[in-house]
Image (tube, rainbow, N blue to C red):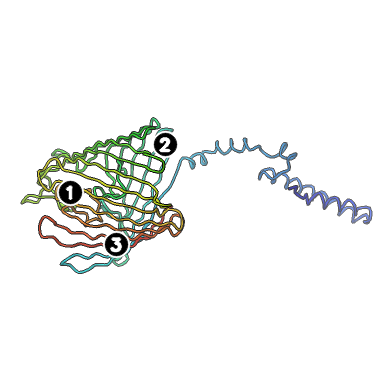
Amino acid sequence: MRRLNVAALVAAVLCTLAPLASGSDIDEIRELRSQIELLSERLRVLEARAGLASPSAATTAAPTAAAAATDAAADPALDWARQLSLKGDMRVRHERLERDGLPDRDRQRLRARVALTARALETVDVTVGIASGGDDPRSANQTFGSSFSRKDVGLDLAYVDWHPTGTLNVYGGKMKYPGFKPAFTAFIDGDLNPEGLALSWHDENGLFANAFSYWIEERAANVDSMWFAGQVGWRGPLADGINFAAAATYQDFANVQGQEPFYLGQSFGNTTTADGSLRYDYDLAQLAVELGFLLGEAPMLISGEFGRNLAVDELDTAWSLGVLLGKASAPGTWEVGYAYGDLEKDALFAQVTESDFADGRTDSRGHHLRAGYAIAKNWTANLQLYLNDLDVSGDTFGFDRVQLDLNFKY
């Protein structure tokens, strides 16, 4: 669309009226014409800067798109901004806990996380994240109350991601667990961010491998407690519309036998000696699988995991099986799911297991039901129900948990 040059039109009208005016009027008109021409020139310059000038004016006054892009690229502030990405989430939760022999408990909780990733080099990214919560390695939740006291915030992530090729990543620092996990898992908690070194590799055929070395406890006068693991697997399509993933993992929790339990002195179901130290070693062999397909128009996901502690001769097996129908992602979409798990007393290293299932303990079994609905983009409502039995090798008691969540991502 051709733009109307208001200044030129006004000048033309004044020129037309000039012969009809008196001498003093002509002087005033000339002064106005001079001012209008000056304003017209200023307008042309502003239009050129904004990229609004006519094609003929653009050739003489406006910078080309390429020149503008070059100027932007040369701006250090703009270049630095392009190297940064920020993401986070917030969850508001109402939770009810019912345990045999204890009063029922209701509480409201908050989890807030934010992480900044910067491109340090072409092949190196650095991520630093903070989260609510205290020092619990399996939870970033903060419970409402305590007379409106300020809530703790801690360093949640701090790691370097070196990706020298398109198929290899080397991580160092405090990071997300790098291994494959099925959709329903009781074996490892989603909030757990271990610390150390890890490698992840994959190829175009769907093969992948992960390995890591993490510090559980560093000691000046004794041998450190470590967590070593290796994993191999494959993910990809089995047929049109059918996807499959499987991974085999071996984990060695080194120098934990004979040590006092690591967080709050609690074994979380693992066997202890008379003095409270961990009785056994934990050398775990595990298998995880996932199968995805369409059931009508809704996605269906079936997942399972099996594990055994090779360092003990009894109460050494854990497994879970789950199914998820639908996916709460786009606004108006939904999902429902069910899983059952059975974690024998020393089948897993209980310091890292999923903290909501069975109150974060082994020696447990039970049901996990969940439902979700996407209210809007990046806003979902979720309901989870855990119906679990604890201390199943001894005097079994029930422990039920209900969670209603509002989740926001940005």
> For residue 258, what is the image quadrant?
top left
Label of residue 120 in the image: 2
Amino acid carrying label 1: it is Phe
Identify the element where label 1 is drawn. Answer: loop
Q: Which numbered disc, 3 or 2, marks the residue closer to the eye?
A: 3
**Closer-to-camera residue (44/369):** 369
Identify the element where label 2 is drawn. Answer: strand
Q: Looking at the picture, how far across and down is residue 366, in whole percent?
A: 21, 57
Residue at horizontal 36%, vertical 39%? 238
Q: CA distance from mark 3 to mark 1?
A: 23 Å
Identify the element where label 3 is drawn. Answer: strand
Q: Looking at the picture, how far across and down is residue 346, in whole percent?
A: 14, 48
> For residue 25, what is the image quadrant?
bottom right
Residue 265 visible, this angle? no
Label of residue 262 in the image: 1
Residue at horizontal 36%, vertical 52%? 113
Label of residue 143 in the image: 3
Asked if the residues shown at circle 3 and circle 2 are in contact, with their CB atoms under 8 angstroms apart, the answer is no
Q: CA distance from mark 1 to mark 2?
A: 35 Å
Label of residue 85 in the image: none
Earlier along the polypeptide chain: callout 3 or callout 2?
Answer: 2
Amino acid carrying label 3: it is Thr
Residue 193 visible, this angle? yes
Amino acid carrying label 2: it is Ala
Q: Residues within 10 Å of mark 1 (few under 14, many from 20)?
A: some
